[in-house]
Amino acid sequence: MGPPPLKLNISRDGDRISALHDDLLLGILERLDLRDAVRAGALSARWRHLPYRLSRLHLNAGHFHRATLLEGMGAFKDAACRLLSVCPPPAAGKSPRVIETLALTFCVSAPHLSFIGRAVEDVVSRGHTKCFQFDICSRCKDGTRRTTQLLTELGKQFMSFSSAYPVAFGWLTFLTLEDLAFGDSDVADLIRGCDKLKDLKLRSCRLVDRHSALKIDTPHAGLENLWFISFRCALIELISVPKLRIFWCWSRKNPPVRCGYVPELYKVELGSRAKASQVPFALSECFSRSATNLSKLYLNFGSQMIWIKPEHPKELTSIFNNLTSLALFNIFSECNLSWTLFILEVAPALQKFRLSRTQHPCAKVSKDNPEKTKIVREPSKDLKHLNLKLFIMFGFEDEDKVTNYIRLVMERAVGLKRIELHGRSPCNGCDAIDLESLRRSQADEASRHRIKEQLRHGSSSSVEIVIC
């Protein structure tokens, strides 16, 4: 016979779960979505106090569906104030409540910001919050037209909010802002006021004067990750951001960024669907000599023109001396690829090289689209790269232009160990399919064998070739 069944001391109106210790019940609730945790707390008097003891809170105004956005923000404000309160007080012998993780997602709404600011400052001023995040957008998701005047006014309201509650913003570790317009110095002032800020994302934001440069000179800031997604300004200048490690920018301008003092910067992602008014620029214009820690570089050309121009290797060698990983995304399929091997000349430590070719039959042609100029630049005949180990291509096609390029990679990268060739996928943006392109990129077993033999013909390389 097995052991006797466990006997629990359960009150007449209780159940097995409710008989568990508070710490165990909190562990259950904190694995639920906050709305479900609050609903569970409303089921019985035994659970009612538990949502007020949660140590991790993520509250999103988008979950409060009301007739108007302002009514939804009102409901969000009321819920936030209740959940962030210290009531009810801890029972005798129990430690006070600690909120270690706090994430609030809401929009700029002047009537409610002060309530949110005060409630948050009451929490973070206790000194126990380790992760604190704001995700803040304009009110434009309710269908309001996104005019410069409106975004400017909302940007002013946000900056007034940050100035009025310095304790709250001083504890922020993650901040995302969307659809706001800023004065020339606002972003730098914001970073200076957020002592603990590690990650800042600005999505679809802009400067009020879009012809001005955004200058960030914050020598004492601890900011590590900086993301600009469709940020409208003339140029982003990182004058001094000494702790910055990751920089991501999808821009409409060339060059999108100029780096000053960024000694810890190790990963940069730049992307742009270039317009007809843009001209190619030299990569050396973006990076300063202080960026010697750079090890990962990702460039996305958005299936439009190649917006970097050839330059002498000596201009880039000192900058890319420690580069180990490179990705060139969305190169238009008609483009000659030999120019990409310039990176082997300037990045002696490179170990991983990814390249993707794209062709979208649904892509709309407009007067703003630039001519897709084909860059002609042959690598040095004496080039022998020793450290590249892995080459990956997406959008591989069984055609001479592509196979000749891969043979060129094999010839110059003498230490290459593995090549992965992935075919082209159907366009995700529409139902149109370039059948001829798909046919060339989808190889059967016999074709795979023939392609491998073609690539290895006349070569002494022992590289492993995988056709996916």
Image: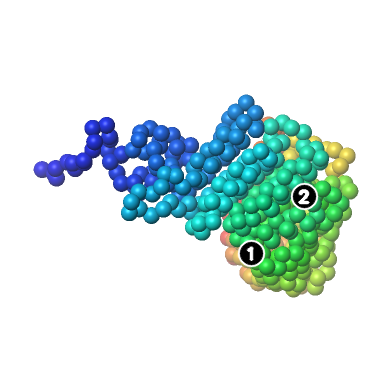
Give x and y (percent) for residue 92.
33, 51
Residue 222: mark: 1
Give x and y (percent) for residue 284.
80, 66
Tag 2 near tag 1, CB within 8 Å: no
Residue 344 in sight in this render: no
SS state under label 1? loop
Up-down relation of residue 13 to residue 202 (above or below) = above
Residue 409 in sight in this render: yes
Up-down relation of residue 214 to residue 69 (above or below) = below
Mark 1, other Cα within 10 Å: few <14 / some 14–19 / many ≥20: many
- Tell me the amino acid under the disc marked 1: Gly
Up-down relation of residue 243 to residue 465 (above or below) = below
Q: Which of the 4 quarters of the picture holds residue 68?
A: top right
Give me the residue at 69% from left, 53% from top: 163
Residue 182: mark: 2
Up-down relation of residue 79 to residue 322 (above or below) = above
Which image quarter is the N terminus in? top left
Give x and y (percent) for residue 269.
70, 56
Q: Which is more toward the observer, 314 or 136?
A: 136
Q: Which is more toward the observer, 337 or 219?
A: 219
Q: Which is more toward the observer, 227 or 468?
A: 227
- Tell me the amino acid under the disc marked 2: Phe
Give me the residue at 60% from left, 28% from top: 66
Mark 2, other Cα within 10 Å: few <14 / some 14–19 / many ≥20: many
Give me the residue at 63% from left, 44% from top: 114
Give x and y (percent) for residue 365.
83, 38
- Earlier in the chain: of badge 2 and badge 1, it is 2
Q: Which is more toward the observer, 145 or 273?
A: 145
SS state under label 2? strand
The chosen color scheme is rainbow
Give me the residue at 87% from left, 51% from top: 211
